[in-house]
C-alpha cells in the first residue's frame, strides 16, 4: 500500500516537473480530445442521419425481392434507379412480416422517377384558352365566359408582342443566318391585327397555329426530374410521424393523388425570381451573408435583374398595367416599361433588400402565379415502364408535405409521395387479376373502338371502359391534342374520384416494404429472424437495414468514421513514437535516480512499475483533461447546436442544426485507446530503466 | 573494540581482483586485495585517486561483482547470489551514503528517509513514521521533514542521506567520499554524526576519503595504492605515513 502510494506520489510529482512529460501530456490531451469530440460528433451524426433515414422513408428495415438484380437504394444509386424485381402481392407478404412480434407496421413502397414537363408559359396560357373555347363549344357562350376568353386572348397577344420585342433585341446580337425565317414569319403573322380579327372564325385552328409555331419559340419550358415513392399513403402518414402536411390537404383515404415534397415544390416549381429572393433572404438571415460580399448572392441579384421574362409572360395586359403602377409607386418614378421597372426593383442591395423582399410579396406576388402548379392541379407524369414503353398518368396534387426537421434537406426533399395505384400504372405492372379484368373490358368494348393510339388509355383506363369514345365530343376529335386532353380529362375525373379499398391497395405489386419495429434496439436480431423465417416460408425476400437500404448515403457516416479512426490511428502511431522517444530521454535523465533506488535496494520490478505508473498516470491526467475539454465542447455544442451550413447537411444533421451528445462509450473508447497507447509506448523505456545499474548511482556530478 | 574483533567479520575479502574493460583495453582496478571488517568498526579507506577505493566499496556494497576472488558480506558469498538476492542483501543489510547525496528530488525529506522502509515492507505506517522521525531527530532535521531536498543546504542533504542509510538499521553502512562535496566544517559534522551513530548503534561504517582530518576519526585506515592493499594503520600512523608520502613527493 505504502509502496503504491509512493509510486503514485513520485509519478504525480514527476508529472509537471519534466518538460518531456508536458509534451507527452499534450499529445495525449489532444489525442483524447480528438477521439472524444470526433467520435461523439460522428456518433451523433450517425444517429441523426439514422433518424432522418428511418423517419423519412426507410423505416427500420426494408424488404424487397430476392430476385432483384441490384440492391435497394431508396435515395437513388449511382446509375439511377436500381433494378429491382417486384413483390408480386404485397397482401401476402404483409401478414407474414407482421407475424414477427417486434414488427409494428409494414408499409408497401415503390420508388421511381420520371420527367415531368412544366410546359412553357405560352403553352400553359394557350391551354387555358383552349379549355375556355371548349367550354364555349359545350355550354354555349355566356358574358362571363366571353370576358374570360378576351382576357386570356389579350394575354396571349401581349406575349407575342413581348416575344417580338425580344426577337428584335437578339437580332442585334445575332447574325442574320442564326435567325430562322420561318419563325420570324410566324411571329410576324401572330402580330398582325388581321390574325386576331379572324381568330374567332376558327379558334381551334388559330390555337393550333400558336401552339405549333409560336409556343416552341419560347424556350422556357422545363423538364423536371421527379422522384416519387408510391405507397399506401394512409399507412405511410400514420407510420412516419415526422411527416406533416404543409399546403393543401392529405390525399383522402383510398383515393389516387400525390403529395409533393415542400422542398421540391419550393425549389423546382416556384417562380424563379421568388425562389432567388427567398434564397437571398435565407442566406442573409440564417448565415449572415451580405450581398456586397458574397458572390453567390450577387449572382442571384444579377439573375433577378436580367431574368424577368418569366414574370413578364405571366402577366396579362391588365395585370401588367397594375404591376407597372405598383412598381412606379414603389420606385417613385414614371418608367413605363415593366421590364425596366422589374429590373430596377430587383436590383437589391443589403440596404434595401428587406423592404424590396416584403414589397415583392405584398405588391407583385398577388398578381403572379408563384408556383407552376397549384394544389388541386392535375399533373401528367410520363415514365418509362419496366418493359420500356412510355406510360402516362394524371395525378391530382392534393398538397405538399415535409418531414419535420428535414424541411431543408434536399435528400429527403426529393421524395414526392404518390398513391400506390398510380405508381403501379406508371411502373407498368398489371396483376393477373387486372389482366383478366382488362381482357374482359376489351371484350365488352368490342375492340374496334380502340385503335393503337388509344390502346394504353383503354388498358389502363380501368373503369372507363368503352364509354370513352362515345363520350368524346365529335367536334374536337379532329384535333389530336384535344382528343387526348378530353380523354385524359374524362379518365382523370373517373379515376380521381374512385376510392380504392384497402384490399385493392394491398393486393398488388410493391417494390419494397418498410418495416417499423417496436423495439429498434433489436434491429439486427429481428432482421436475422425475418431472413430465416422468410427462407423457411419459401418467400424470396431480402431483408436489409435502413442503412443498407439508403445505399451510398447510408455508408456515408461509416466512411467518415473510418476516416476518423484512420486519422486517430495515424496520430496515435506518431504519438507512440514520440512518447517512446520522450520516455527514453526521460529515463536517461533519471539514470542516477534510478541507480540510487536500485543501490538502496529497489528491485527491477519496482522500477518497472514506477515508470509504468508514471505513464499511465500521465495518460490518465492528460487524457482526463482532454476528455473533460471534449465533454465541455460537446455539451456546449449540444446546447448551441452545429448549424448545417448547406442544405446537403440537413439530412445528415436531421434538421437545421445538429445537437451532438456525448455517450459514455465515446469517453470509454477514448480512455482505453489513450491508456493503451501510453502503456505500449512506455514498455521499452521502462525495460531500459530496469537495466540501469546501481553503479550509475555512484557517478559523481563532476 | 576487542570484543568486536572477536566476532566473525561482516565483510571478508579474499584475493579480489577487478578488471574494467574500456574498449579493447583491460584496466585493472583491483589487483588482489584482502580485507576483513568486523562489526562495529569505523573504517576509512584511503588512497590517491585511481587507487581502487570506489571499486572496493562497490564490491562490498554488492553493486558490482569481482573478476576473481571472494567477496563475502554478512557471511554470504556475493558471487553465489542472484541479482534479486543481491538487491535484497543491499536493502536489508547495507546502507549507502553517496558523495552527491543522491536524494530523490521529488520526494520530501521524510519520504526520502522512509523510502528504504517502504521497499522493505516490514513496518507498518506508524512504525515507519516513528522510525523516520527518530532518525531525523538524530541527524537534527526534525524540523525539515516536509522540505524538498532542493530547499536544503549540502550538509543538510547529506544528513538526510545518512538518515536514509541508517533508517533500516543496517549492519553495514558504506560511504564513498561522503564529505567530498561539502565544506570542511560541514564535512566534519557529517563524520561526527556518523561516528556518533557508530558508537550508539554499533553500526559498521566503511567510508572512503582522502581527507586526513576525516580519516582521523576512523579506528583503522586501510590504504590502497594501484589497486593493491598497502597497509592497515591507526589514524595517527596513517597521518604520519601520509605526511611522509607528501614529503616524498
Image (cartoon, coloured by chain):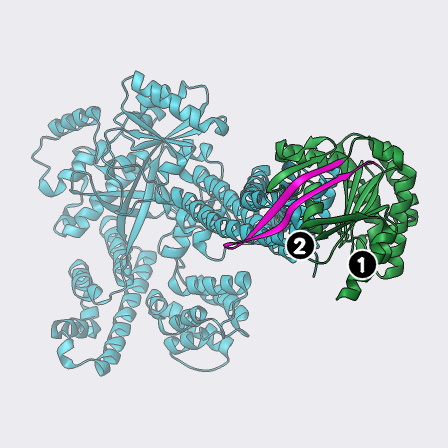
Count all numbered tags in the image, as a single digit. Answer: 2
Residue A584 rendering spot, x and y as whole percentages: 57, 51
Give the x, y percent position of residue A85. Answer: 23, 32
Q: Is residue B130 visible?
A: no
- Quadrant in the picture for the C terminus of chain B: bottom right
Q: Is residue B22 magenta?
A: yes
* Chain name for mark 1: B
Residue A45 drawn at (x, y percent): 49, 45
Seen from the viewer's position, the closer of residues A593 and A264 is: A593
Crowd class of label 1 (few under 14; some 14 to 19; many from 20; radius 10 Å): some
Is most of the magenta stretch helix, strand or loop?
A: strand
Query: SS of the residue at dot 2?
Result: loop
Q: Is residue A529 above or below residue A266?
A: above
Q: Are marks 2 and 1 in contact (CB under 8 Å)?
A: no
Q: Chain of mark 2?
A: B
In the drawing, what numbered circle is on residue B133?
Answer: none
Question: Disc 1 marks which residue?
Answer: B242
Real-space Cα distance between discs 2 and 1?
Answer: 16 Å
The foreground one among A367 and A665 is A665
**Residue at position x 36%, y 37% from top?**
A549
Report the side of A350 relative to A165 (left or right): right
Q: Which chain is green?
A: B
Precedes in sequence: disc 2 or disc 1: 2
Disc 1, SS: helix
The span picked out in magenta is B11-39
Colour representing chain A: cyan
Q: Where is mark 2, residue-wise?
A: B226
In front of the other: A415 or A7: A7
Amino acid at each position: 500500500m505504502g509502496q503504491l502510494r509512493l509510486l503514485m506520489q513520485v509519478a504525480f510529482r514527476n508529472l509537471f516537473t519534466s518538460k518531456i512529460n508536458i509534451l507527452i501530456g499534450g499529445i495525449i490531451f489532444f489525442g483524447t480530445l480528438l477521439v472524444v469530440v470526433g467520435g461523439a460528433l460522428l456518433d451523433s451524426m450517425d444517429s441523426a442521419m439514422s433518424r432522418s433515414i428511418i423517419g423519412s422513408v426507410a423505416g427500420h428495415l426494408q424488404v424487397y425481392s430476392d430476385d432483384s438484380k441490384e440492391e435497394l437504394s431508396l435515395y437513388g444509386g449511382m446509375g439511377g434507379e436500381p433494378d429491382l424485381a417486384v413483390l408480386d402481392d404485397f397482401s401476402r407478404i404483409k401478414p407474414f412480416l407482421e407475424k414477427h412480434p417486434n414488427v409494428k407496421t409494414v408499409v408497401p413502397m415503390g420508388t421511381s422517377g420520371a420527367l415531368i414537363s412544366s410546359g412553357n408559359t405560352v403553352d400553359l396560357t394557350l391551354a387555358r384558352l383552349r379549355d375556355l373555347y371548349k367550354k364555349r363549344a359545350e355550354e354555349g357562350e355566356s358574358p362571363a365566359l366571353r370576358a374570360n376568353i378576351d382576357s386570356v386572348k389579350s394575354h396571349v397577344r401581349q406575349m407575342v408582342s413581348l416575344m417580338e420585342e425580344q426577337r428584335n433585341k437578339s437580332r442585334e446580337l445575332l447574325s442574320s443566318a442564326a435567325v430562322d425565317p420561318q419563325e420570324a414569319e410566324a411571329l410576324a403573322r401572330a402580330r398582325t391585327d388581321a390574325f386576331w380579327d379572324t381568330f374567332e372564325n376558327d379558334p381551334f385552328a388559330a390555337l393550333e397555329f400558336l401552339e405549333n409555331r409560336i409556343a416552341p419559340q419560347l424556350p422556357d419550358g422545363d423538364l423536371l426530374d421527379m422522384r416519387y415513392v408510391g405507397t399506401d399513403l394512409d399507412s405511410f402518414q400514420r407510420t412516419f410521424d415526422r411527416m406533416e402536411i404543409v399546403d393543401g390537404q392529405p390525399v383522402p383515404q383510398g383515393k389516387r393523388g400525390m403529395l409533393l415534397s415542400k422542398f421540391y415544390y419550393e425549389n423546382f416549381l416556384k417562380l424563379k425570381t421568388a425562389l432567388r429572393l427567398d434564397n437571398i433572404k435565407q442566406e442573409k438571415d440564417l448565415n449572415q451573408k451580405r450581398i456586397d460580399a458574397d458572390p453567390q448572392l450577387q449572382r442571384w441579384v444579377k439573375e433577378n435583374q436580367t431574368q424577368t421574362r418569366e414574370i413578364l409572360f405571366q402577366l396579362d395586359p391588365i395585370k401588367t398595367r397594375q404591376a407597372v403602377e405598383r412598381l412606379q409607386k414603389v420606385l417613385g418614378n414614371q418608367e413605363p416599361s415593366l421590364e425596366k421597372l422589374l429590373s430596377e426593383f430587383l436590383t437589391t442591395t443589403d440596404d434595401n433588400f428587406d423592404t424590396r423582399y416584403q414589397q415583392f410579396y405584398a405588391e407583385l406576388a398577388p398578381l403572379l402565379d408563384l408556383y407552376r402548379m397549384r394544389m388541386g392541379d392535375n399533373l401528367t407524369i410520363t415514365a418509362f415502364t419496366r418493359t420500356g414503353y412510355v406510360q402516362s398518368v394524371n395525378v391530382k396534387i392534393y398538397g405538399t408535405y415535409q418531414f419535420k426537421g428535414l424541411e431543408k434537406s434536399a435528400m429527403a426533399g426529393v421524395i414526392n409521395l404518390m398513391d400506390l395505384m398510380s405508381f403501379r400504372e406508371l411502373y407498368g405492372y398489371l396483376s393477373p387479376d387486372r389482366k383478366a379484368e382488362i381482357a374482359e373490358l376489351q371484350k365488352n368494348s368490342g375492340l374496334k373502338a380502340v385503335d393503337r393510339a388509344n390502346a394504353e388509355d383503354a388498358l389502363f383506363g380501368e373503369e372507363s371502359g368503352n364509354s370513352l369514345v362515345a363520350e368524346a365530343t365529335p367536334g374536337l376529335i379532329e384535333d389530336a391534342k384535344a382528343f387526348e386532353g378530353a380523354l385524359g380529362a374524362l379518365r382523370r375525373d373517373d379515376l380521381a374520384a374512385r376510392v380504392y379499398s384497402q384490399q385493392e391497395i394491398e393486393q398488388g405489386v410493391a417494390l419494397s416494404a418498410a418495416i417499423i419495429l417496436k423495439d429498434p434496439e433489436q434491429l439486427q436480431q429481428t432482421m436475422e429472424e425475418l431472413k430465416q423465417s422468410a427462407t423457411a416460408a419459401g418467400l424470396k425476400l431480402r431483408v436489409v437495414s435502413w442503412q443498407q437500404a439508403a445505399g451510398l448515403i447510408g455508408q456515408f457516416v461509416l466512411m467518415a468514421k473510418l476516416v476518423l479512426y484512420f486519422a486517430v490511428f495515424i496520430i496515435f502511431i506518431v504519438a507512440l513514437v514520440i512518447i517512446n522517444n520522450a520516455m527514453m530521454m526521460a529515463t536517461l535523465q533519471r539514470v542516477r535516480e534510478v541507480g540510487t533506488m536500485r543501490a538502496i535496494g529497489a528491485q527491477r520490478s519496482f522500477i518497472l512499475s514506477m515508470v509504468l505508473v508514471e505513464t499511465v498516470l500521465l495518460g490518465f491526467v492528460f487524457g482526463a483533461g482532454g476528455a473533460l475539454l471534449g465533454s465541455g465542447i460537446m455539451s456546449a455544442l449540444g446546447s448551441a447546436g452545429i448549424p448545417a451550413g448547406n442544405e446537403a447537411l440537413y439530412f445528415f444533421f436531421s434538421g437545421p442544426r445538429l445537437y451532438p451528445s456525448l455517450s459514455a462509450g465515446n469517453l470509454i473508447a477514448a480512455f482505453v485507446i489513450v491508456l493503451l497507447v501510453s502503456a505500449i509506448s512506455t514498455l521499452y523505456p521502462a525495460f531500459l530503466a530496469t537495466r540501469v545499474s546501481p553503479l550509475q548511482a555512484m557517478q559523481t556530478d563532476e | 573494540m576487542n570484543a568486536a574483533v572477536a566476532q566473525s567479520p561482516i565483510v571478508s575479502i579474499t584475493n579480489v581482483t577487478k578488471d574494467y574493460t574500456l574498449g579493447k583495453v583491460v584496466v585493472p582496478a583491483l589487483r588482489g586485495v584482502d580485507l576483513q571488517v568486523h562489526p562495529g568498526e569505523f573504517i576509512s579507506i584511503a588512497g590517491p585517486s585511481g587507487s581502487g577505493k570506489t571499486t572496493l566499496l562497490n564490491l562490498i556494497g554488492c553493486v558490482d561483482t569481482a573478476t576473481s576472488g571472494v567477496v563475502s558480506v554478512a557471511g554470504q558469498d556475493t558471487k553465489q547470489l542472484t541479482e534479486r538476492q543481491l538487491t535484497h542483501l543491499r536493502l536489508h543489510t547495507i546502507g549507502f551514503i553517496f558523495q552527491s547525496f543522491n536524494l530523490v528530488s521529488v520526494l520530501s525529506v521524510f519520504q526520502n528517509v522512509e523510502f528504504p522502509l517502504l521497499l522493505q515492507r516490514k513496518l507498518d505506517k506508524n512504525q515507519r513514521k516513528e522510525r523516520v522521525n527518530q532518525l531525523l531527530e538524530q541527524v537534527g532535521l526534525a524540523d525539515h521533514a516536509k522540505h524538498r531536498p532542493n530547499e536544503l543546504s549540502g550538509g543538510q542533504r547529506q544528513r538526510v542521506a545518512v538518515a536514509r542509510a541508517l533508517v533500516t538499521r543496517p549492519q553495514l553502512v558504506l560511504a564513498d567520499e561522503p564529505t567530498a562535496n561539502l565544506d570542511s566544517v560541514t564535512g566534519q559534522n557529517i563524520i561526527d554524526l556518523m561516528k556518533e551513530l557508530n558508537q550508539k548503534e554499533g553500526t559498521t561504517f566503511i567510508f572512503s576519503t582522502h581527507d586526513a582530518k576525516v580519516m582521523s576519526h576512523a579506528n583503522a585506515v586501510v590504504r590502497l595504492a594501484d589497486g593493491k592493499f598497502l597497509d592497515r594503520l591507526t589514524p595517527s600512523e596513517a597521518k604520519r605515513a601520509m605526511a611522509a608520502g607528501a614529503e616524498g613527493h
